[in-house]
Amino acid sequence: MAAQGQQMQFSEQDQRELAQFLEAENAKARIQQTVHEMTDVCWNKCIFKINNKMDRSDESCLANCVERFLDTSMFIVKRLEDLRSSAV
C-alpha cells in the first residue's frame, strides 16, 4: 500500500484504459438518466388511471411520446454537433 502523500503512477496504457472505462460508465449513466426522464414525462402525459391492463389509447400515447422524445433528442444532438463543427 502506498504511503500517505505518495501518488500512484499509471502507465499511458493504464490511463487510456481508465479513460475508456470512465467514458463507457458515463455513457451508461446518461442512457439511464434519459430513460428515467422519458419514463417520467411519458407516464405523466399518457397514464391517467391505473388498471390491471393498459388500454390501447395508453399504449399508443406511450409509443408516440417515446418516439417524439427520441426524435427531439436526436435533433438536438445533431444540431449541437452541426454548431460545434461549424465553430471549428
Image (spheres, rainbow, N blue to C red):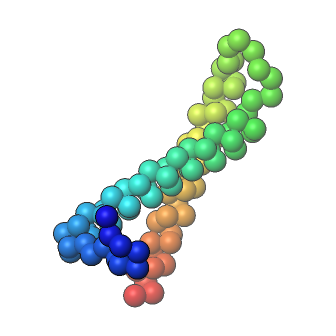
User: Who is closer to the viewer here, 58 or 35?
Assistant: 35
Q: Residue furthest right?
A: 48
**Residue drawn at 70 percent across, 35 percent down:** 43
The x and y percentages for residue 82 are 45, 74
User: Who is closer to the viewer here, 71 or 34?
Assistant: 34
Q: From the image, which quarter does the N terminus lie in?
A: bottom left
Mark count: 0
**Placement of 68 over or under 78, stated as above or below:** above
**Residue drawn at 35 percent across, 78 percent down:** 6
For residue 87, which quarter of the picture? Answer: bottom left
**Placement of 83 over or under 15, stated as above or below:** below
Q: Residue furthest top?
A: 52
In-image side of 38 versus 31 (left or right): right
Q: From the image, which quarter does the C terminus lie in?
A: bottom left
Can the viewer see residue 48? yes
In-image side of 69 versus 74 (left or right): right
Q: Residue furthest bottom?
A: 88
In-image side of 14 versus 85 (left or right): left
The x and y percentages for residue 56 are 66, 20
**Residue drawn at 49 percent across, 64 percent down:** 77
The x and y percentages for residue 80 are 50, 72
The x and y percentages for residue 39 are 63, 39
